Image (tube, rainbow, N blue to C red):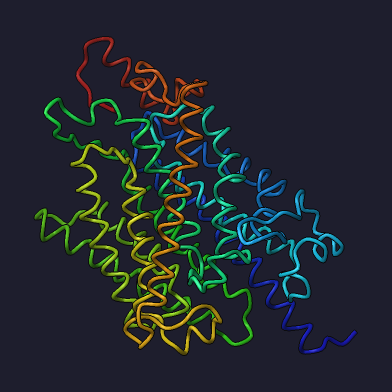
Amino acid sequence: MELTLEQLASYIDATWVMISAILVIMMQMGFALLEAGSTRMKNAGHIAGKQILTFGLCTLAFWALGFGLTFGDGNAFLGLTGFFFDGSAAQVEASFSAFAGGSVPVTILFLFQLAFCAVSLAIAFGGFAERAKLSVYFIFSVLFTVLIYPVVGHWVWGGGWLGELGKQDFAGSTVVHLQGAVVALVATIMLKPRIGKYNRDGSSNLIPGHNQVYSVLGVLFLWIGWFGFNAGSTLGTADGFFGYVAMTTNLATAAGAVAALAISWIVMGKADIPSMLNGVLAALVAITASCAFVDPWAAVVIGAVSGILTFYTAIWFDRKGIDDPIFAFSVHGVAGIWGTLANGLFATPELAEQVGVGGPGLFYGGGFAQLGVQALGIVATMVYVGIVSFIILYVLKAVMGLRVTEEEEVVGLDISEHGVYGYPEIMQSNSNQKSTGVSSHTLS
């Protein structure tokens, strides 16, 4: 049977979005390596393993309720249809009118949007690292996927009130990253610092990650996966616009890496690799909202500023006694805020018209209108997510507790929660040396 050009285009679009979904799901590998490498050896297996657990829980909850709450037909605040998604034409027509008649099968769109929700959840759990009970991950994964993520997702992308106002968030600086970062900040504050992080006088002790190579590899996986994240959000290939989005994404990321390393060298006297990695991620977060709306030169500015902002805010939070093990709020929260506001400054009239969302930014004759909408979206997101996540964690703390015992934290979550270390030979050797009085490195 001969294919029409329209059919061929739809098949290519569907293939591109499927590939993009796989790239975004692959970002879970990046988070596993980054978080495990940035934390201590005694928690490495736990940190990496919970990535699979939480992705599984997120998948089931998003299928049952989250997808319908985010994208189902409803009102300005929430989707109310399409639960227990089955991909049938009848359900799509009855529950997902925005997707009906599209060139990409809704089953592929489900996988693509699931991957976004899972990334937001992974960011949120950065604030739980090295001290939260495994049982908390079970419950909070489901509640986040049902009660937190879909609400803001619907406001912006599902036909909700922020989308109607013209809020520009092409791939999720607010919807994905700021949501996860706010949860991480609330959890970090409620869980309190790790044992040994702060002295009685309030001064901070460095708790370095155990494997910087893992952290670098994790960031590289995330960088590659982000092309699916941003360029994949075009949901098509016909006009080649996905290439432009990929280009602005890469320019911003490169600028963030260089700027963060440079500022660390200037301030600390050494070129700090973790700071550079945070600069990469912060730039990726910031450009996620604006990759389709700004000129290349603006992408470079957005990326460079985000790298510098993340460096200074990470230091500030640490001095304030907020022990954020992987700097989740500095990287995903501060950069998410900056990236969202950047649209209100740098969005061009031509690109805003091409994408079909909002208007030009302040520097392109748009006045403060778009900037105001962007700021409103930030405030609304932080208030909603902050309140709901606090309530959930407060109840969990009262009912079952959030944090492992002091003894469990000292020996490490690998052994206390799973019964085996991620590095059994090394940890066992170290334990034997200590018990026999032989000096050894402290592998904590």
The furthest residue to the right? 1
Q: Position of residue 170 (x, y in %)?
A: 51, 71
Whether 384 is drawn above or below 246: the answer is above
Q: Quadrant of residue 349?
A: bottom left
Query: Is residue 334 depicted above or below 245 in this figure?
Result: above
Q: Residue at x 40, y 81 (%)?
A: 347
Pick the residue in front: 40 or 113.
113
At horizontal 51% and vertical 52% (from top left) the residue drawn is 119
Relative horizontal placement of residue 295, taking residue 153 as reference (left or right):
left
Quarter assignment of residue 97: bottom right
Tell me where residue 136 appears, x and y as whole percent: 51, 30
Query: Where is the N terminus found, in terms of image quarters?
Result: bottom right
State the image quarter where residue 44 is shown.
top left
> Which percent across, then down, holds residue 151?
58, 53
Quarter of the image for the C terminus: give it: top left
Q: Residue at x 51, y 67 (%)?
A: 171
From the viewer's perspective, is residue 1 above or below residue 259?
below
Q: Where residue 232 sits: x, y (%)?
A: 57, 70
Number of residue marks: 0
Foreground residue among 370 and 191: 370
